[in-house]
């Protein structure tokens, strides 16, 4: 009798277990992930727009993921190192504003580690496709795209003294002279958008590159160039003080509110030379789809926070939580633009 009772008890215990017994035994592993703090690397300078965004989003980490999110930077500028000019030039594909050092270091991360990095089109669709580009020790295939964190629309501005206020007046002014346009670097998306736009306008052009869009705007304010391309937030001060005039936004449509109200988008003129600057979250290649999904859903929830939306509005950037397929299409479009003008 005692033996029979023992068998019955064991059978009942097994039945209970398979019917949803002790939860800890059958909890899916992804529910326990992450078991340590998450790290998100910004491969660009502290204080920049993406760095500010990364730190703000990270502040919701523990609430959303049950673990803190640590926002950090891994950034080295080639022009901040004391070396010969020729040696610096040879290092440019690895050091500099593209954040390539960070991507190289990130390759040490293993799949499913709670370590992530932010990327953009510069490193994956522009730099590798430039004429005579050196082979970088990483590629887009080394990463798994998760979600787009923010998007920025570029604006073309002109010296107010030139009285160029739209593409019609730009085309008229450019018929009699070669226009000079300042952009923030040879690997910047704006370098290729302005070339494509002037091709569509059938105007001669000389692009002058600077180490940043802010320096490009300084050159415009000093009247060293006719025009400059930058993010809207960077051009805001000059537009407000009247030293520069917005000409066109590199987007499908223009603005109806704010300081750029009334400025048309390139697409409204019937041209196709526009593309957004997008920053997106990446994981190491091979990371489980469940981790990708959990990070995407978590960051999508964070991006919907009112404080985040208010910050984005103040920075003049957009929330576009694109998925991996949309990110792939974006990079392909940028690569096509680069290939047409390299």
Image (cartoon, rainbow, N blue to C red):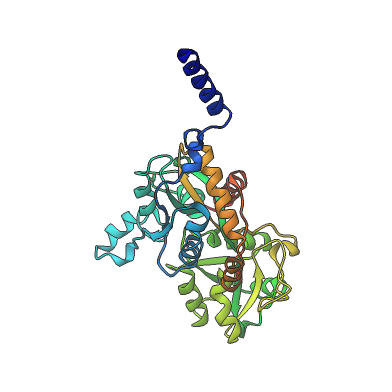
Left or right of 55 on screen, residue 147: right
Q: Given the current orientation, which residue lies at the most extreme left position?
A: 83
**Residue 129 shows in the view:** no
Percent x, y for residue 254?
71, 68
**Residue 291 shows in the view:** yes
- Identified at 34% across, 61% down, the residue is 76
- Residue 312 sits above or below residue 122 on the image: below
User: Quadrant of the rendered structure where residue 109 is?
Assistant: top left
Left or right of 63 on screen, residue 301: right
Q: How many marks?
A: 0
Left or right of 20 on screen, residue 58: left
- Residue 73 sits above or below residue 139 on the image: below
- Identified at 24% across, 63% down, the residue is 83
- Residue 182 sits above or below residue 24 on the image: below
Viewer-nearest residue: 204 or 119: 119
Viewer-nearest residue: 273 or 150: 150
User: Quadrant of the rendered structure where residue 45 is?
Assistant: bottom left
Percent x, y for residue 203?
64, 65
Percent x, y for residue 154?
59, 66
Viewer-nearest residue: 334 or 191: 334
Left or right of 86 on screen, residue 144: right
Percent x, y for residue 241?
58, 87
- Identified at 48% across, 78% down, the residue is 218
């Amino acid at each position: 009798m005692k033996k029979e009772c023992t068998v019955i008890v064991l059978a009942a215990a097994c039945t209970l277990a398979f019917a949803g017994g002790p939860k800890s035994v059958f909890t899916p592993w992804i529910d326990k992930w992450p078991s340590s703090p998450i790290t998100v690397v910004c491969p660009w300078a502290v204080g920049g727009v993406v760095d500010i965004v990364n730190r703000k989003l990270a502040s919701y980490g523990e609430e959303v993921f049950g673990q803190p999110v640590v926002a950090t930077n891994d950034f080295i500028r080639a022009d901040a190192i004391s070396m010969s000019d020729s040696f610096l030039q040879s290092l440019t594909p690895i050091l500099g504003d593209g954040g390539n050092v960070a991507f190289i270091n990130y390759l040490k991360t293993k799949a499913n580690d709670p370590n992530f990095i932010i990327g953009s089109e510069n490193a994956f669709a522009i730099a590798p496709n430039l004429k005579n580009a050196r082979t970088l020790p990483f590629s887009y295939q080394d990463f798994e795209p998760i979600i787009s964190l923010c998007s920025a629309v570029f604006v073309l501005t002109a010296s107010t003294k030139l009285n160029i206020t739209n593409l019609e007046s730009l085309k008229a002014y450019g018929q009699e002279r070669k226009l000079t346009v300042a952009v923030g670097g040879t690997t910047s998306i704006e370098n290729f958008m302005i070339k494509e736009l002037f091709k569509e306008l059938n105007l001669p052009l000389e692009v002058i590159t600077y180490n940043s869009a802010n320096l490009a705007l300084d050159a415009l304010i000093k009247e060293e160039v006719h025009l400059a391309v930058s993010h809207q937030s960077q051009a805001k001060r000059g537009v407000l003080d009247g030293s520069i005039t917005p000409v066109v936004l590199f987007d499908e449509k223009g603005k109806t509110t704010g300081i750029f109200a009334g400025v048309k988008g390139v697409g409204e003129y019937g041209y196709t030379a526009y593309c957004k600057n997008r920053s997106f979250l990446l994981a190491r290649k091979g990371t489980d789809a469940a981790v990708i999904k959990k990070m995407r859903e978590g960051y999508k929830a964070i991006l919907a926070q009112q404080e985040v939306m208010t910050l984005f509005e103040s920075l003049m950037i957009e929330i576009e939580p694109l998925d991996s397929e949309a990110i792939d299409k974006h990079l392909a479009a940028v690569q096509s633009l680069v290939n047409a003008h390299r």
